[in-house]
Amino acid sequence: MKSLLFLPLLLLGVFFTSCKKEEITQEIVPNRTINFTVQSGAWVKDDNRLSHYAELPVPELTDQVNQTNGVLVYISDDGQTWEAIPDVLHGISFLYTYTVGKIYLEAQDVNGTQLASPPGGTIYVKVVLVESEPV
């Protein structure tokens, strides 16, 4: 007798409960890429660090970007083949540092004991700002 009452209650429970379809919309924020051309005359000598540097203005590099996002820098001597920095290109070691509004591209001799000559030709630079959320 109890099982006969239980079956209709079970069927009513199945029919009156429903599944709610929930759509999750994921917002994808694309990375930002900024290209620069650094001419041979743009390099400034730094005797203290035995290197040369070029200052790249990046107004997109705000304080929020500086604190939360990723900054990647690539270089090329032909604008087609890109190498991630830090890197050695034609015997010159390249590295970069950044702060709000600026990226400093530094070129130094690979052994670090003597002042390197600045890059003789045009250097193409690609800066990629990678969106990120702090955890």
Image (cartoon, rainbow, N blue to C red):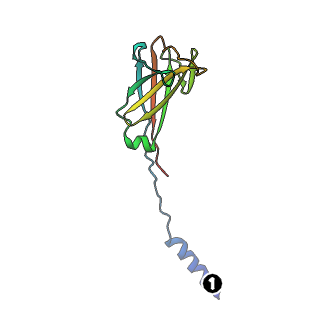
Q: Nearer the viewer, residue 2 or 105?
A: 105
Question: 49 or 29, which lies in front?
Answer: 49
Image side of residue 34 versus residue 5, left or right: left
Looking at the rendered structure, the kind of residue marked 1 is Leu
Please give the name of the residue rendered at 54% of the width and 75% of the height, measured from the top-left corner.
Answer: 13
- The image quadrant where one finds the N terminus is bottom right
When asked about the image quadrant of residue 5, the answer is bottom right
Residue drawn at 45 percent across, 44 percent down: 68
Q: Which residue is farthest front? A: 48
The reply, left or right, for residue 44 in relation to residue 80 is left
Vertical arrangement, residue 100 with respect to residue 105, above or below: below
Say few, some or many: other residues with alpha carbon within 10 Å of mark 1 (under 14 / 14 to 19 / 20 or more): few
Query: Residue at the top extreme?
Result: 120
Q: Residue furthest bottom?
A: 1
The x and y percentages for residue 132 are 47, 44
Residue 127 location, quadrant: top left
Label 1 sits on a secondary structure element that is helix
In the rendered image, residue 111, in percent from the top left (x then y), is placed at 61, 20
Residue ID for mark 1: 4
Residue 52 image point, x, y percent: 47, 20
Residue 80 position within the rendered picture, expressed as x and y whole percent measured from the top left: 50, 17
The residue shown at (41%, 22%) is 36
Q: Which one is in front, 94 or 5? A: 94
Q: Count up the numbered dots.
A: 1
